[in-house]
Image (cartoon, grey):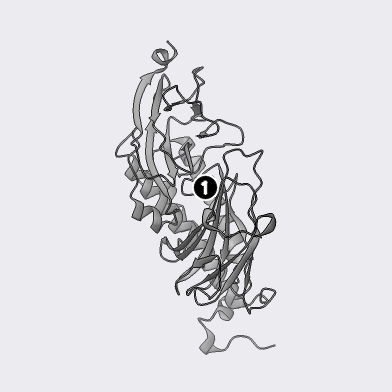
Amino acid sequence: MTGPTPEDSDSGLARVMDGRIWDDFCDGLRAAGSAVLAGPVPEDPLDRAEGWRYLTRLLRASLNFFLEVPDPEAPAFTRAVDETIKMGMDNPDNVYLAAPVKGDLTYRLTGTRGTVHYLGFGSQAGGYAKTGSLDTTGYLDASDLVLGPDGRFEIIASTDRPPGADNWLPMSPETRMIQVRQTRVDHDDETLAQVKIERIDGPANPRPVTPERIDKALGEVAAFVQLTSQMFAEWTEDFRQHPNTLPRFDPDKALAAGGDPNIAYYHGWFELDDDEALVIDLDPPACDYWNVQLANYWLESLDYRYHPVHLNQGTAEYQPDGTVRVVVAGSDPGVPNWLDTCGHRHGTMCVRWIGATEHPQPRTSVVKLSELQS
């Protein structure tokens, strides 16, 4: 066996053989730590500890996506975000799936609709590891799906709509990923959709690993951890400029980060003393779904497995006039719709509506816990 020749000195093969691939990967991860130590980040032990954990979570997510399922010639869906991998104000009611694709190829998505409350398919270009954005290039709402027996469906994803295709997910030549969002109102009683993807006229199985592929993948992993942590920290710093409020988030900015075009987002920053609570008054509009949730500085949802950190239209207690009063506090004040800050005196929060035609502004006020209890 012969090694790399001099003209191959910058090739993936040469980098794999001489170890530069690993040195650059480790250097990239080391550089990502600057997001946790950046000047604007509060010097709070909990924020700092969660920041280091956050980087490991981004690393796990990106290793899985870029290294284990990176072949757009024979893609597969993987769960991109879950109970312990979080980013970008992940919704506790959502199950997120993602598969790598190439915009100039054609794909078939098949599966069963299930009973999940909301189901959406999005094609996206760019990527946090490439451009720092994840632009939506096409979207298909499951309410528009033509379904067969037992809720079965077939979707064609391509740049041009094929003749006779009942369900089409548009792509552009720049599309690099297809994401599926499944949103639940009742986690216990809803059946998730089952979704598979295949390239039409493509190989049945992924291609064997090559040195060039591993070199490229590790570079993308390191870039993903760096750019993702930096981008969402910048978002948080914007939210901190208007504490204890929930202004409407720029729809164009949401779309550029891979947001659902059917969702109106309201992002904010809470900051409370131990004896204070934040009251959020909502007038939920007619919509497919709404929720409110808490997250940490890094835009990771708080631990919804064990703590009440989010509400939706099925779990919130309404007032007689149809409004909802949510109370954010570090301890249970004994009132309905309490959201637990889980030891955080500050953090981020979000309200979202799906499919609303009206967008009423959430109202907020800070009160003393003693006043609230009385």
| Relative to 234, 33 lies left or right | right
Q: Residue furthest top?
A: 374
What residue is rendered at 43% in x and 22% in y? 274
Near mark 1 (Cα within 10 A), the count class, few <14, some 14-19 or many ≥20, is many
**Res 128 → quadrant:** bottom left
Quick check: 199 above or below 277? below
How many badges with numbers are in the image? 1
Residue 18 in view, yes or no: no
Provide the residue designation for mark 1.
Answer: 54
Tell me residue 215's x, y (percent): 56, 73
The vertical placement of 114 against 69, above or below, is above
- Image coordinates of residue 73 in percent, x first then y, are 60, 75
Residue 231 location, quadrant: bottom left
Where's residue 222, x and y in %? 51, 62
Left or right? Give the position of 118 relative to 174. Answer: right
Q: Is residue 190 above or below residue 257?
A: above
Who is closer to the viewer here, 368 or 192? 192
Q: Mark 1 falls on what kind of element?
A: helix
Quarter containing the C terminus: top left
Residue 291 in the image: x percent, y percent? Answer: 48, 38
Furthest toward the left, the residue is: 241
- Look at label 1 and name its amino acid: Tyr
Q: Is residue 76 left or right of residue 367?
A: right
Quadrant location of the N terminus? bottom right
Task: Look at the image and tell me whether residue 230 can be seen.
Answer: yes
- Identify which residue is drawn at 44% across, 47% down: 355
Residue 11 to residue 131: above or below: below
